């Protein structure tokens, strides 16, 4: 094997090890912050939990603030990047909304402690981190609302206030971090599928109800569309 080939393998192994250690570091930090609070947890506590020395810990993080910043960024920027990539595809709004729910529920179901920690630590976040968190949170909401608005314009979704609907979808997905327990009676895949069905079902135009067929049903839907258009023009 060439020297270059050996070097690439060692580099890949080093990167993989670093990622594994960083993930374990985030897990221990999340647990300790939740148990003792951010102020009550020291870097030495985290190093002890990780089974390394404090000087060795400095290879991965320099301070508690930096560690908290990384956790916040992972929780907020990670899904935002995925959602923006989905929205940029300009695919069918119904399919896009389902995939958005899958991203959000997947994050909350696999890393619930990190999201709960973020919510509980909002008051302790440094000002610049709070600003970044708020910016990302607004961007996530805007992206979801944009997809819903596209669905309304395309006729796939009934006339709704896209921002309010997006808040409903986001809240439903975020709440998974509090009630879903891996290994319990529900699977992440089953929960994701059901919540995606619920999100889409709540926005799609209802089928014709008994006694509302024909011209009467069409006129009723046109009135709903006109009401929605008037609300948009009044903004």
Image (spheres, grey):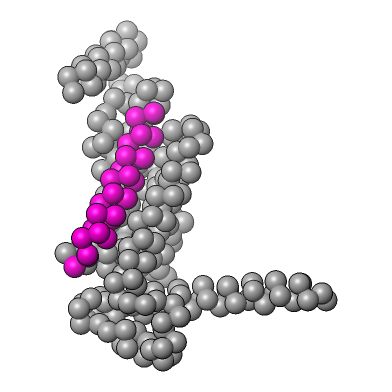
Q: Using the image as rendered, state which of residue 212 and residue 133 is in the foreground.
A: 133
Q: Which residues fall within the magenta stretch?
A: 124-151
Q: Principal SS element in the magenta part? A: helix
Name which residue lies at 41% across and 82% down. 58
Q: Using the image as rendered, state which of residue 14 and residue 115 is in the foreground.
A: 14
Location of residue 210 in the rendering, given as x and y in whole percent from the top left corner: 30, 21
Write down the quadrant of residue 60 in the picture. Answer: bottom left
Residue furthest out toward the top: 215
135 falls in the magenta region = yes
Name which residue lies at 29% across and 13% down. 222
Location of residue 26 in the rendering, given as x and y in whole percent from the top left corner: 39, 74
- Quadrant of the frame with the N terminus: bottom right
Name which residue lies at 28% across and 45% down. 138
Q: Is residue 10 visible?
A: yes
Relative to residue 151, is residue 17 depicted above or below?
below
Q: Is residue 192 visible?
A: no
């Amino acid at each position: 094997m060439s020297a270059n080939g050996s070097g690439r393998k060692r580099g890949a192994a080093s990167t993989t090890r670093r990622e594994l250690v960083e993930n374990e570091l985030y897990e221990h930090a999340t647990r300790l912050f939740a148990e003792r609070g951010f102020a009550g947890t020291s870097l030495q506590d985290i190093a002890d939990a990780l089974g390394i020395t404090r000087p060795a810990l400095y290879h991965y993080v320099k301070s508690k603030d930096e560690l908290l910043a990384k956790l916040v960024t992972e929780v907020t920027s990670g899904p935002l990047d995925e959602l923006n990539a989905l929205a940029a595809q300009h695919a069918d709004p119904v399919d896009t909304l389902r995939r958005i729910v899958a991203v959000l529920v997947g994050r909350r179901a696999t890393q619930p402690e990190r999201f709960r920690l973020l919510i509980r630590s909002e008051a302790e976040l440094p000002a610049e981190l709070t600003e970044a968190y708020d910016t990302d949170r607004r961007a996530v909401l805007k992206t979801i609302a944009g997809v819903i608005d596209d669905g309304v314009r395309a006729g796939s979704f009934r006339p709704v206030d896209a921002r309010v609907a997006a808040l409903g979808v986001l809240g439903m997905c975020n709440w998974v971090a509090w009630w879903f327990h891996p290994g319990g009676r529900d699977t992440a895949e089953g929960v994701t599928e059901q919540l995606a069905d619920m999100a889409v079902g709540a926005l799609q135009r209802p089928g014709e109800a008994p006694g509302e067929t024909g011209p009467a049903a069409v006129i009723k839907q046109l009135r709903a569309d006109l009401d929605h258009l008037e609300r948009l023009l009044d903004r």
